[in-house]
Image: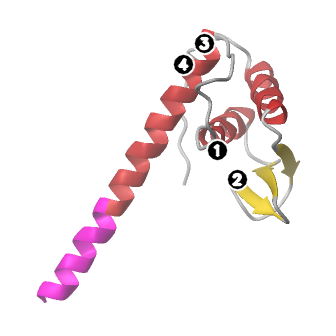
């Protein structure tokens, strides 16, 4: 399950934040697709075209967080961004890294238990 902290540090409405992130994606040549389905979303490569797919049924705040996390996998150092948008992207990048580290740690611990059993 995907959790989003309440409260937007950007002081932007979720719809405006999502629009800003979609514009950033377009400037990077990444198509953002928002559609219904049994998925949460993320980035992918389809016939050598970069795409980010978001579930239309998710709350706007969650779509923005998912989009931001996907965008942090692209090189953004030389991209001109509003400071608050760069801060939001960094926050989401850290949140994704933290979740990934926790997941890997749990999986690694389970493997060690199985090997030692």
Q: Are marks 4 and 2 in contact (CB under 8 Å)?
A: no
Distance Cα–Cα, label 2 vs label 1 = 6 Å
Q: Residues within 10 Å of mark 2 (few under 14, many from 20)?
A: many
Residue 5 seen in render: no
Judging by the rendered image, the residue that carries numbered circle 1 is 70
Determine contact: label 4, label 1, CB under 8 Å.
Answer: no
- Name the residue beneath numbered marker 3: 84
Marks 3/4 in contact by CB < 8 Å: the verdict is yes
Pick the front one: 3 or 68? 68
Give the distance between the C-alpha atoms of the residues marked 4 and 1, in whole angstroms.
15 Å
* Residue 14 % position (x, y): 73, 23
| The C terminus sits in image quarter | bottom left
Residue shown at 83% from the left, 47% from the top? 56
Identify the residue position indicated by label 4 in the image.
Answer: 87
Q: Is 36 placed above or below 69 here?
A: below
Q: Residue at x 35, y 62 (%)?
A: 104
């Amino acid at each position: 399950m995907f959790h989003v902290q309440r409260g937007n540090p950007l002081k932007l409405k979720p719809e405006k934040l999502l629009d800003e992130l979609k514009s950033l994606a377009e400037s990077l040549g990444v198509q953002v697709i928002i559609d219904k389905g049994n998925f949460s979303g993320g980035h992918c490569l389809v016939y050598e075209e970069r795409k980010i797919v978001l579930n239309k049924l998710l709350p706007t705040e969650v779509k923005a967080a998912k989009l931001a996390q996907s965008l942090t996998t692209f090189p953004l150092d030389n991209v001109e961004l509003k400071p608050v948008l760069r801060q939001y992207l960094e926050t989401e990048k850290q949140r994704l890294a933290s979740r990934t580290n926790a997941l890997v740690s749990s999986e690694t611990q389970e493997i060690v238990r199985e090997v030692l059993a």
